[in-house]
Amino acid sequence: MLNSLASGRRLALRIILLQLAVALLAGLVFLALGHREAVAAAAGATTVALGTALMSVRFFGDVGGAGQALGRLLTGMLLKWIVIVGGLVVILFQFKLPPLAAITGLAAAYAVYLLAFRFKG
Protein backbone atom coordinates (compact mmCIF):
# COMPACT_ATOMS: atom_id res chain seq x y z
CA MET A 1 0.00 0.00 0.00
CA LEU A 2 2.74 2.48 0.83
CA ASN A 3 4.55 1.82 -2.45
CA SER A 4 1.49 2.69 -4.49
CA LEU A 5 0.96 5.84 -2.42
CA ALA A 6 4.58 6.87 -2.87
CA SER A 7 4.48 6.18 -6.60
CA GLY A 8 1.26 8.18 -6.85
CA ARG A 9 2.95 11.12 -5.15
CA ARG A 10 5.92 10.86 -7.52
CA LEU A 11 3.61 10.71 -10.53
CA ALA A 12 1.66 13.75 -9.30
CA LEU A 13 4.89 15.71 -8.81
CA ARG A 14 6.12 14.70 -12.27
CA ILE A 15 2.81 15.80 -13.83
CA ILE A 16 2.94 19.17 -12.06
CA LEU A 17 6.53 19.79 -13.14
CA LEU A 18 5.72 18.81 -16.73
CA GLN A 19 2.70 21.13 -16.72
CA LEU A 20 4.87 23.99 -15.50
CA ALA A 21 7.39 23.19 -18.26
CA VAL A 22 4.54 23.29 -20.78
CA ALA A 23 3.49 26.67 -19.33
CA LEU A 24 6.98 28.00 -19.98
CA LEU A 25 7.06 26.49 -23.46
CA ALA A 26 3.61 27.84 -24.34
CA GLY A 27 4.64 31.28 -23.14
CA LEU A 28 7.77 31.17 -25.28
CA VAL A 29 5.85 29.98 -28.35
CA PHE A 30 3.20 32.68 -27.99
CA LEU A 31 5.87 35.32 -27.40
CA ALA A 32 6.19 35.45 -31.18
CA LEU A 33 2.65 36.88 -31.28
CA GLY A 34 3.17 39.38 -28.50
CA HIS A 35 3.64 39.89 -24.80
CA ARG A 36 -0.06 39.63 -23.86
CA GLU A 37 -0.47 36.36 -25.78
CA ALA A 38 2.61 34.90 -24.08
CA VAL A 39 1.31 35.83 -20.64
CA ALA A 40 -2.13 34.42 -21.46
CA ALA A 41 -0.74 31.08 -22.66
CA ALA A 42 1.58 30.72 -19.69
CA ALA A 43 -1.17 31.71 -17.24
CA GLY A 44 -3.63 29.23 -18.76
CA ALA A 45 -1.17 26.37 -18.41
CA THR A 46 -0.08 27.46 -14.94
CA THR A 47 -3.71 27.43 -13.83
CA VAL A 48 -3.93 23.75 -14.72
CA ALA A 49 -0.69 23.01 -12.86
CA LEU A 50 -2.01 24.84 -9.80
CA GLY A 51 -5.25 22.87 -9.94
CA THR A 52 -3.35 19.60 -10.25
CA ALA A 53 -1.15 20.54 -7.29
CA LEU A 54 -4.18 21.37 -5.16
CA MET A 55 -5.85 18.10 -6.07
CA SER A 56 -2.67 16.15 -5.28
CA VAL A 57 -2.24 17.80 -1.89
CA ARG A 58 -5.86 17.06 -1.05
CA PHE A 59 -5.76 13.45 -2.24
CA PHE A 60 -2.38 12.40 -0.89
CA GLY A 61 -2.81 14.19 2.45
CA ASP A 62 -3.58 11.70 5.18
CA VAL A 63 -4.04 7.95 4.99
CA GLY A 64 -7.49 6.59 5.70
CA GLY A 65 -10.00 4.05 4.53
CA ALA A 66 -11.43 3.57 1.07
CA GLY A 67 -14.40 5.83 1.75
CA GLN A 68 -12.13 8.63 2.89
CA ALA A 69 -9.91 8.16 -0.15
CA LEU A 70 -12.89 8.44 -2.47
CA GLY A 71 -14.10 11.55 -0.65
CA ARG A 72 -10.65 13.14 -0.87
CA LEU A 73 -10.44 12.29 -4.57
CA LEU A 74 -13.83 13.83 -5.31
CA THR A 75 -13.19 16.98 -3.29
CA GLY A 76 -9.74 17.27 -4.88
CA MET A 77 -11.24 17.06 -8.36
CA LEU A 78 -13.89 19.61 -7.43
CA LEU A 79 -11.23 21.99 -6.09
CA LYS A 80 -9.13 21.44 -9.21
CA TRP A 81 -11.96 22.42 -11.52
CA ILE A 82 -12.88 25.41 -9.37
CA VAL A 83 -9.28 26.62 -9.66
CA ILE A 84 -9.13 25.99 -13.42
CA VAL A 85 -12.47 27.61 -14.25
CA GLY A 86 -11.90 30.45 -11.78
CA GLY A 87 -8.41 31.05 -13.12
CA LEU A 88 -9.70 31.11 -16.67
CA VAL A 89 -12.39 33.61 -15.70
CA VAL A 90 -9.77 35.85 -14.07
CA ILE A 91 -7.45 35.56 -17.08
CA LEU A 92 -10.17 36.35 -19.60
CA PHE A 93 -12.44 38.81 -17.82
CA GLN A 94 -10.38 40.55 -15.16
CA PHE A 95 -7.08 40.84 -17.02
CA LYS A 96 -8.71 40.73 -20.48
CA LEU A 97 -5.94 38.61 -21.98
CA PRO A 98 -6.35 36.95 -25.40
CA PRO A 99 -8.69 33.95 -25.08
CA LEU A 100 -7.14 31.78 -27.81
CA ALA A 101 -3.71 31.87 -26.19
CA ALA A 102 -5.13 31.21 -22.70
CA ILE A 103 -7.23 28.26 -23.84
CA THR A 104 -4.35 26.87 -25.90
CA GLY A 105 -2.06 26.96 -22.86
CA LEU A 106 -4.77 25.38 -20.73
CA ALA A 107 -5.34 22.59 -23.27
CA ALA A 108 -1.62 21.93 -23.66
CA ALA A 109 -1.12 21.58 -19.90
CA TYR A 110 -4.16 19.36 -19.56
CA ALA A 111 -2.87 17.17 -22.41
CA VAL A 112 0.22 16.53 -20.25
CA TYR A 113 -2.10 15.36 -17.48
CA LEU A 114 -3.89 12.96 -19.80
CA LEU A 115 -0.73 11.65 -21.47
CA ALA A 116 1.05 11.07 -18.15
CA PHE A 117 -1.34 8.26 -17.28
CA ARG A 118 -0.89 6.70 -20.71
CA PHE A 119 2.91 6.59 -20.35
CA LYS A 120 3.48 6.03 -16.64
CA GLY A 121 6.91 4.58 -17.26
Image (spheres, helix red, strand yellow):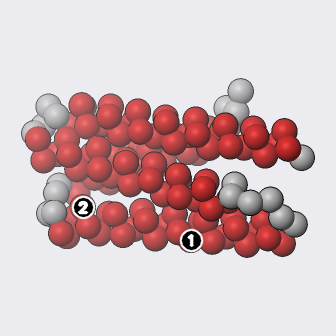
> What residue does disc 2 label?
91
- The answer to which of marks 2 and 1 sits earlier in the sequence is 1
Q: Position of 40 compared to 84: left or right?
A: left
| Residue 75 visible, this orientation | yes
Mark drawn on residue 38: none
**Residue 84 image position (x, y, % from top left):** 42, 62
User: Circle 2 — which element?
Assistant: helix
Residue under the image location 62 percent in, 43 percent down: 12
**Quadrant (top left/top right/bottom left/bottom right) for the C terminus:** top right
Q: Residue 90: name its quadrant.
A: bottom left
Q: Can the viewer see residue 101 in this picture? A: no
> Label 1, on which residue?
78
Vertically, is 82 above or below 98? below
- At a point 85% along the width and 44% down the height, the residue shown is 2
Residue 103 x %, y %: 32, 54
Q: Residues within 10 Å of mark 1 (few under 14, many from 20)?
A: some
Left of 41 or right of it: where is 106?
A: right
Is residue 8 positioned above or below 90 on the image? above
